[in-house]
Image (cartoon, helix red, strand yellow):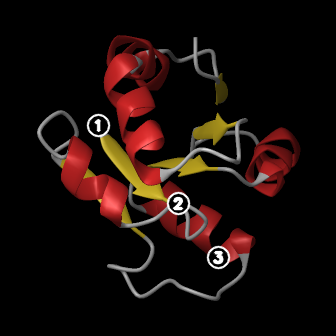
Amino acid sequence: MKILLDENISYRVIKKVRHLYPEIVGVIELKLVSISDRTIWTYAKQNNYTIFTKDEDFNELSLFNGYPPKIIWLRESYLNNQEIADLLIEKYEIIEAFILDTELGCLELYRG
């Protein structure tokens, strides 16, 4: 599962979840910081990434343009890095099923 963390999610989360998501990468690592959401969306599409973000703009891009890329939209913006990592670990099976599903383009994540 190739997951691209948007810049609104700390790169520190990557170290905490790489054991489950070996192909997770942040926009910072790819030097895609401070560029438009459209450019990140296009990069993700061309490189088969699912975007993990707190930003609803990616969902809107997906609604207008379809998918890929798929979007995992974190709906709880106040979570700290450890809570985000815990959520990614806890929801691993749901995320995996979503990425493999050919019918769905956006997964909204919440705790609980």
Whether 65 is drawn above or below 9: the answer is above
Q: Quadrant of residue 21?
A: top left
The kind of secondary structure element at disc 2 is: loop
Provide the residue designation for mark 2: 9
Q: Nearer the viewer, residue 33 or 64?
A: 33
Q: Quadrant of residue 75?
A: top right
On screen, residue 70 versus residue 106, left or right, reads left
- Give the image location of residue 26, x and y in percent: 39, 67
Amino acid type indicated by mark 1: Met
Amino acid type indicated by mark 3: Thr
Q: Are marks 2 and 3 in contact (CB under 8 Å)?
A: no
Label 3 packing within 10 angstroms: few (<14), some (14-19), many (20+): few
Amino acid type indicated by mark 2: Ile
Provide the residue designation for mark 1: 1
Provide the residue designation for mark 3: 39
Residue at image coords 18%, 46%: 18
Q: In terms of sequence position, does the residue under pointer 3 or pointer 1 come before the other?
A: 1
- Give the image location of residue 41, x and y in percent: 62, 62
> Where residue 18 is drawn, which disc sits there?
none
On screen, residue 5 versus residue 96, left or right, reads right
Whether 110 is drawn above or below 78: the answer is above
The kind of secondary structure element at disc 3 is: helix
